[in-house]
Image (cartoon, coloured by chain):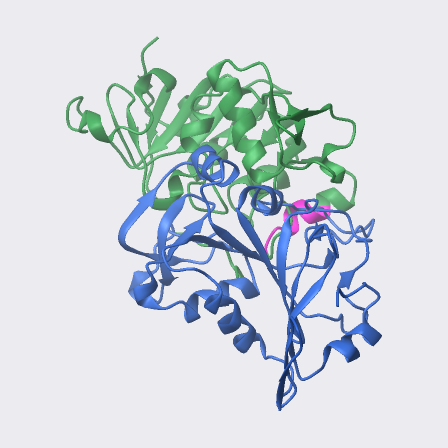
Amino acid sequence: MGVTIAATADEAVAGVEDGATVLVGGFGLAGMPFDLIDALIRQGAGGLTVVSNNAGNGDVGLAALLKAGRVRKVVCSFPRQSDSYVFDELYRAGRVELEVVPQGTLAERMRAAGAGIGAFYCPVGVGTPLAEGKEIREIDGRAHVLEYPIKGDVALISAHRADTMGNLVYRKTARNFGPVMATAATTVVAQVTDVVPAGEIDPENVITPGIYVDRLVRAEARRLTVQGAR
Amino acid sequence: MTATTTQSVEHTDRGPLSTDELAARIARDIPPGSYVNLGIGQPTGVAEHLSADAGIVLHTENGMLGMGPAATGDEVDPDLTNAGKVPVTELPGAAYFHHADSFAMMRGGHLDVCVLGAFQVSQAGDLANWHTGDPDAIPAVGGAMDLAVGARQVLVMMKLFTRDGAPKLVPACTYPLTGTACVGRVYTDHGVFATGPDGVRVLETYGTTVAELRERLSVDLLP
């Protein structure tokens, strides 16, 4: 299936169902798909499981989705930050469930989903509360914990530029989870600052090949940084 | 006066190290040419003491090698941050990669050194640095467990005692663990320690002596 270039972000996120698992790109605000999240809030799907590195910053992006009450569960590595007050309040009120996953394991679980791997053994987390209840196996003299893939119904990611084939390039550390999430969801939606004709991105420079991308929409980059970061 | 016992150097002619002096002390132990990850918080300060000609390459787990200093003024680019989400700069020869690759290079043993902060380190090198275990605290681990397991050498930078005077180098951690038997060296304001299966060896002291530390710590310090 080829890529659809949507006229609006609303069109790009159409069809997300209640209870869906949504992979949301970004590390803090770098690579956060702001326009797609705003459109998802307007679209109205609720009871969502959101998989993302963080649990929102300030009042924008993922924090806005949480604030709108659409999220049932957050799967992330680092929810608590200087400006994660929206999540903090919901969590303390018992209104959102949290699964904390080591950052690399989070990425690898999505990579496994996208690569057709059934599960994998990983040394990270052994002997810690995050491995409790999970199968442990010793491999080559070292204990490993069994980790299962995380597959999304939808991935919302932000990239720098696309071509009309859906090939994506990213910018600097805003790349973060985009290429992995693009492989791991049934429907992959990318917001990009520009869509250029096929052939204008050097094939040697493509980071996410268009085969992974279902829908594109143009959106202006928002120059936001995390407040109080250290 | 500086005294040397069989294995420990006692710097008694001065007080404990300041945070900046501690960062400089750690920087001296990072071999030239290393690939290094500096944890969020105080370890970030180690970068300021690395010699420019040492060829040390900084890794940031959000997806970059060749990270430069914090960005200022017009250099600030929201697409370019460190793991603490602070805007940073890139050095010539920098490389960007996605998260799964970034942690693969860590777990795969390609990263030479990481420097992490800690709540507690046990005498066997267990690390606790992500969660106080307080039921009201929101747990957040980030890349701490991946770094603890993945880097070839894990160095800890911390104060030796809490504000209440409780030692943070302990026989066994009481906080939830980040990783087991992963810390090789603990750099503190009062001394530098080697941790491992045999126990704790004091390498250096600052403003105190091995004998005094033996009184204040409940871990067995190897002779």
Q: Nearer the viewer, residue B222 or B105?
A: B222
Magenta span main SS? helix
Residue that appears at 56% across and 66% down? B42
Quadrant that contains the C terminus of chain B:
bottom right
Residue that appears at 73% across and 76% down? B210
Chain letter for green, please: A
In the displayed structure, would residue A138 be above or below residue A129?
A: above
Q: Position of residue A198 (x, y in %)?
A: 18, 21
In the displayed structure, would residue A165 be above or below residue B154?
A: above
Task: Please tell me the colour of chain B.
Answer: blue
Name the side, left or right, on which B156 lies relative to B218.
left
Q: Position of residue A224 (x, y in %)?
A: 42, 52
Q: Is residue A84 magenta?
A: yes
Q: Is residue A78 magenta?
A: no
Find the magenta span and give its range. Answer: A83-89
Name the side, left or right, on which A94 lies relative to A69.
right
Q: Is residue B16 visible?
A: yes
How many numbered dots are placed on residues in this image?
Answer: 0
Instruction: Name, please, the residue furthest toward the left.
Output: A199
Q: Nearer the viewer, residue B181 or B198?
A: B198
Q: Position of residue A203 (x, y in %)?
A: 20, 25
In the displayed structure, would residue A131 be above or below residue B70?
A: above
Residue that appears at 81% across and 63% down? B219
Instruction: Give the image quarter of residue A122.
Output: top right
Instruction: Name, please, the residue furthest toward the top.
Output: A1
Q: Position of residue B22 (x, y in %)?
A: 56, 73
Instruction: Give the image quarter of residue B9.
Output: bottom right
